[in-house]
Amino acid sequence: MKYNRIPLVAGNWKMYKTPAEAKQFARLLREKAQGLGGVEVIVCPPFPALPAVATELAGSRIGWGAQNMHWAPEGAYTGEVSGPMLQALGCRYVILGHSERRRHFGETDEQIRQKLEAALTYGLRPIFCLGEDLSIREAGGAEAFCRRQLQAGLSGLGTINPADLVVAYEPVWAIGTGKTATPADAVAVIKALREELADLQNEAVAGQVRFLYGGSVKPELIGSFMQEEEIDGVLVGGASLNVDSFTAIIRGAAEVRGQRD
Ligand code: 13P
C-alpha cells in the first residue's frame, strides 16, 4: 500500500526574532514562496511573535506553529503557555520534545507524553521530536533508543488521526553542529520508527504519519534528503532564520517532490 504523504518543510526559529523581525520575515517569505507548490510550509516563531506572524500569513499557504506548550489546560504554572491558549490564537502545530527542551529544561519522556496527549486534545498537531546523542549512535544503539522514545511519547494514546501527528528525527549530535546525518542514516532510523508506530498504532497510521529529518539542514543538502521516499520533510533550525536560505530549502524540496509525485 502506497500512501501519499504531503512533504512538510518546517522552520524552528528557537529563541530568535522579535515580533517586528518575525513580521518582516513572514511578509518576505509569503512573497518569495509564491509558486512553490506541492510542499507544506510552516514556521514556528517564539511565543511573543505568534500573533504578528499569524496576521502576516493569514490567507497564505504558509502555516505556523509554536515551539512548546504545557500539558495542563490552565493552572498555577508560572511562565507556561497552554494548548487552549495556542488554540485560541489559531495555532495549528506545536513542536514537542525538542532535545533542547529535554536537555536545558529537564523535560522527561512522561512530560512529553502528557504534552502530546494535551496537544491532540486541543486540536494542535504535535511535531514530536526525538533522537539519540553521539554516544548512543557510536555504540550502535540509535534505532533502539529512538524506538523507545517514540513508544514512551505515544504510550496510552488512543488511535491517532495520522494527519495530526508529525515525528521529527533529530539526532542530538547533528543539531546546530553543522554535522548532518546521511540520508541513509536518517532513512534507517525512520524505517525503524515507522515499524514501531505500526506496532503501537497500526499499519495505516504508520504509513500516513509524516516523518521529518532535522539537524543542520542546509539548502545544498535538501535534495539528497527529499529524494528518499521515507523522509517526508525537514525541520530546520539555523537555516530557517534567513528568508533566502529557508526559501531555497522550500524550493529544493518542491523540485524533488514535483518530479516524484
Ligand atoms: P539546526 O538546523 O540549527 O541544526 O537545528 C535543528 C533543529 O533543532 C530543528 O528543530
Image: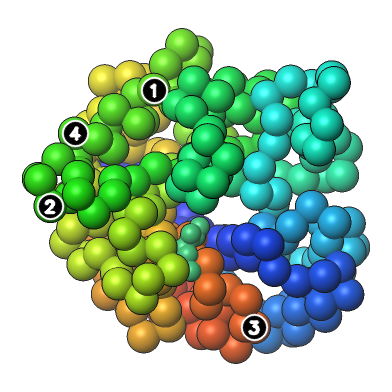
Residue 163 is at least partly visible in this image? no
Q: CA distance from mark 2 to mark 3?
A: 35 Å
Residue 144, numbered label = 4
Residue drawn 53% across and 35% down? 106
**Label 4, residues with CA under 10 Å away: few <14, some 14-19, many ≥20:** some
Q: CA distance from mark 4 to mark 2?
A: 13 Å
Which circle, 1 or 2, is nearer the viewer?
2
Does 147 appear above or below 215?
Answer: above
Q: CA distance from mark 3 to mark 1?
A: 36 Å
Q: Secondary structure at mark 1?
A: helix
Q: Nearer the viewer, residue 187 or 110?
A: 110
**Nearer-N-terminus badge (3/1):** 1
Residue at mark 4: C-beta within 8 A of ligand 1: no
**Nearer-N-terminus badge (4/3):** 4
Give the labeled residue for mark 1.
152
Residue 218, numbered label = none
Percent position (x, y) of residue 27?
Answer: 81, 79
